[in-house]
Amino acid sequence: MRDVRKYYNGVHFTPHMKALASDTLARFEALEDLTARLYPNASLRVKRTDYLRTKTTTAVTRSMLHEARYASRLSKEAPANAMGLPLNAPLTLAAEAPLPPFDARLEDLIADAMQFNPDKQRLELAVQAASFKIDEARSGHLPTIGLEASTYTVWNDCQGGLFNDDNRDGWTIGIGIEVELRITAAGMDKETLKDIVDRAHIVCPYSNATRGNIKVTLTLV
């Protein structure tokens, strides 16, 4: 039943989407025609980049209109398919039901969206860290780097088989990096500092990029 209701709403929505795409295309085609008239006449206000940008935008909008037309045709077949009817089965849709009243405040919607926004969380942690004047002390030594390499050669008098001139010789190499960051914060207890550092380490893009690849140790001093 949920899928049928969803496709029912889709049938009523796609005509609006198609009409919007058609109206937008008509506007861009008029703009393209105007740009095409001004650019060849050496207008100082219309450059070649403006002309090409307008043609590109019109082409993209035209493609969107074709997609909207395709979605409109597809949406009419979806309800029958969801109900197990033949694709060409005639269907009569009920009138579009009015939408329920929407009484949510914009401030509440923004607050709910920002509550789970990772970018906002990173900014909050950065501001909090700056307010407590947290700085990363140099660990006193360069990051530890480990190297591992090996080579091999296979002696085989046979000319055929699994080993040949292309894979008879080979080598492998591995690199490992270990980093220790010592963190201090003047006037802050270690429990509060640890909580901030742990939360920042979770959402930090650099931590996410190196996690599992580089061993990072965070030490509070």
Image (cartoon, helix red, strand yellow):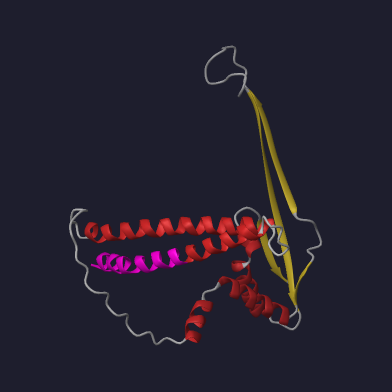
Residue 183: image x %, image y %? Answer: 73, 71
Q: Nearer the viewer, residue 57 or 9?
A: 57
- Total of numbered circles in the picture? 0
The C terminus sits in image quarter: bottom right
Residue 18: image x %, image y %? Answer: 39, 64
Q: Residue at x 48, y 64 (%)?
A: 26
Magenta stretch: helix, strand or loop mostly: helix
Residue 203: image x %, image y %? Answer: 60, 68
The N terminus sits in image quarter: bottom left
Q: Nearer the viewer, residue 160 or 110?
A: 110
Residue 71 among magenta residues? no
Q: Nearer the viewer, residue 112 or 204?
A: 112
Q: Which residues are magenta?
A: 1-23
Q: Nearer the viewer, residue 83 or 221?
A: 83
Residue 2 among magenta residues? yes
Q: Residue at x 68, y 33 (%)?
A: 150
Name above or below for residue 124 compared with residue 19. Answer: below
Image check: 160 left or right of 4?
Answer: right
Name above or below for residue 184 compared with residue 88. Answer: below
In the picture as drawn, the residue positioned furthest to the right comes out as 140
Residue 178 seen from this side: yes
Residue 201: image x %, image y %? Answer: 63, 67
Residue 16 in which image quadrant = bottom left
Q: Residue at x 70, y 55 (%)?
A: 178
Residue 209 seen from this side: no
Image check: 57 left or right of 80?
Answer: right
Image check: 107 left or right of 193?
Answer: left
Q: Residue at x 69, y 57 (%)?
A: 41
